[in-house]
Amino acid sequence: MIVVNQRFEFECYDIGHLYNLAHFVDRGLVKPPFLVQSIFGILGGIGPEPDSVLFMKQTADRLFGRDYVWSVLGAGRHQMPLVTLSAILGGNLRVGLEDSLSIAKGQLARSNADQVLKVRHILEQLSLEIATPDEARQMLSLKGRAAVAF
């Protein structure tokens, strides 16, 4: 038997998804630390309002305590404001062309790097700490670059 130790990202588009995840944690099917990627502004999911971000974070904190890593994805024009809010709240964030094609109103991003540099600049201006790749691997209990076959 081959045992594969994999880490999953749990995408939560609405509050009910957090409760579904809590069910699997309670049954021992999901073990901490795990990554909760809260997604805002997608049709059929929770709205992109700051109150929704706060509610999602408060609910996850109540359900999981310190046993999870929280991250925010804001779709489309909501990307930069919502991921900045996540960082202010002590969370993590995700940016990239998969989530938004723009770098500013009416301006397409040339690459994912454009968006990463922009959010990095915003966070540095707010004096927020940015994790290194090694620190991110440690937070998520990932095996690290040396243990992968590519």
Image: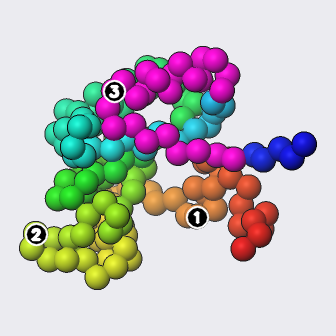
Mark yes or no: residue 50 visible. no
> At 16% across and 71% down in the image, what residue appears?
104
Q: Which mark is residue 133?
A: 1
Q: Circle 3 sits in a helix, a strand or a loop, which is it?
A: helix
List the residue tagged with mark 3: 15
> At 36% across and 32% down in the image, what residue appears?
57
Q: Circle 2 sits in a helix, a strand or a loop, which is it?
A: loop
As displayed, is residue 9 above or below residue 122? above
Q: Nearer the viewer, residue 45 or 124?
A: 45
Dot 3 or dot 2, earlier in sequence = 3
Q: Name the amino acid, label 1.
A: Pro
Extreme left residue here?
Answer: 106
To which quarter of the image does residue 46 belong? top left
Name the spot of residue 133 as percent of width and height, x first.
58, 64
Rounded to the nearest whole Å, what is the CA distance between mark 3 and mark 1? 29 Å
Dot 1 or dot 2, earlier in sequence = 2
Q: Nearer the viewer, residue 18 or 139?
A: 18
Rounded to the nearest whole Å, what is the CA distance between mark 1 and mark 2? 30 Å
Dot 3 or dot 1, earlier in sequence = 3
Q: Name the amino acid, label 3.
A: Ile
Marks 1,2: beta carbons within 8 A: no
Extreme bottom residue here?
Answer: 110
Q: Which residues are magenta?
A: 6-29
Name the spot of residue 69 as percent of width and height, x first.
51, 40
Q: Is residue 27 magenta?
A: yes
- Mark 3 against mark 2, which lies toward the viewer? 3
As displayed, is residue 52 above or below residue 108? above
**In the figure, is residue 22 to the left or right of 58?**
right
